[in-house]
Image: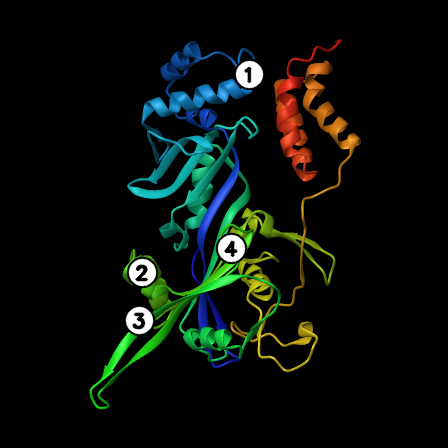
Amino acid sequence: MSSMLCSNTKIDMQNFILNVDWLTLSGSQHLALARERFLSPSQKEERKNQQRTAEELDIIEQMKAEGIALSAEGTVIVGNLILDVLDYGTRFYSVMINVYYGRELFGILLSYPRAKNMRADSFQMKIYNRWLYRPDVWHMLTYVCGTLGLVPQRISRLDLAADFNQFACGLHPIEFIRQFMSGELKKKGRSEGRVNFLQEYVSSKAAGVSRDTLHFNALTIGKRSSDACCYLYNKTLEMREGQLKPWIVQAWTDAGLNIDEVWRLEISLTTKALRCLDKDTGDYVEFGVANLADPDSDFTTLKLFHIYLQSLFFFFRPSGQRNVSREKMLPLFGDPIPFTRVVLRDCNPSDRAERVLVKKLHTMVDKYRGFSRDDQHEMRDFAKRLADSCGLGSWYSEKKTYWKDTKYKV
């Protein structure tokens, strides 16, 4: 995502830039159909003679055959894109593809899932970090998805990164962590985390003594495995010790930051964290793919960032009152955007009625006439989603193997 300069003019004129630093999309893919458009008439005829029709193949077996055929080709050219099919997949997907636009890597595409309980046409694509800092990333994403027949339906992972030199209230991040560790600052709500530091010994020739100094360089709130977590760290130090990314440094320079010491507050969100309820208005809000590319959206990345600041990074100076909810949030990134977040859990109670409904959805096409293979795929997807929402996922996985051999009167 292109750099977004957010000026906090009310508090010490401090600036920060907000970027999307990690983006993984998921949805349904139609790679085979997309490739057909770029084949010559003779190639289309040859492919038609080699392949069986969809009616002759179960949809799962059909997609599996497509994945095997694609893996065997190695390098595939589709439009202006070069697909470098790797010799290995992942734990969940059998095909991994590096997608290049010319010589530039745009993203990593995972397709053709191994597990039978996943949609046969599902995919995931991680956008290469460098593209996320380019202003034409959304135009390019539209082209890639259109060319490859990808239909993004949700965001699997989204990392928002705010880069700055010091907080809007004038507090340096090292001093902020020190005050938090000493109890001068408190965090609202329950959470767990960790602090990273560097201990050094400094010799003073004048005094003739040596003393140790403690430099804090990172603070983590929450677990990396949770739906949402945040990470405050010295980004300049991280890139100096690890991989230097010139496009990030250029974004800092363009924003007028001191590149010698840039700190980052990174908020990492999964699909579940992108759906919540505004307690004040009662409105159900969901941050999706369209919100990323639309600057006029009512639900922008900046608003999402402030929502999770209030949820995960709410710090205050204790005033002595017992009701912590009345404490005033420290304006680390300027005035917050008002929003009271309530987490929506996709969890429902269940009894025999839900089990019967799951079975009926799974076996509907086998039991009743007039349904197609596409209907079967859709019904079983509904059955899985219902089972998962009721905590019946394991039960459903076990039972559907027995239902396959059931005989019905039709």
Q: Which comes before the other along the chain, label 1 or label 4? A: 1
Residue that carries the numbered disc 4 in the rendered image? 223
Q: Is residue 301 in sight in this rendering?
A: yes
User: Is 300 or 61 nearer to us in this picture?
Assistant: 61
In which quadrant is the N terminus drawn?
Answer: bottom left
Q: Which comes before the other along the chain, label 3 or label 2? A: 2
Residue that carries the numbered disc 3 in the rendered image? 260
Query: SS of the residue at dot 3?
Result: loop
The reply, left or right, for residue 320 in relation to residue 52 is right
Q: Which comes before the other along the chain, label 4 or label 3? A: 4
Name the colouring of the figure: rainbow
**Residue 58's mark?**
1
Q: Which comes before the other along the chain, label 4 or label 2? A: 4
Q: Amino acid at mark 2?
A: Met
Say which of marks 4 and 3 sits in front: 4
Residue at far left of view: 205
Q: Position of residue 149 (x, y in %)?
A: 48, 32
Residue that carries the numbered disc 2 in the rendered image? 239
The reply, left or right, for residue 245 in relation to residue 182 is left
User: Is 106 or 113 nearer to us in this picture?
Assistant: 113
Quarter occupied by residue 263: bottom left
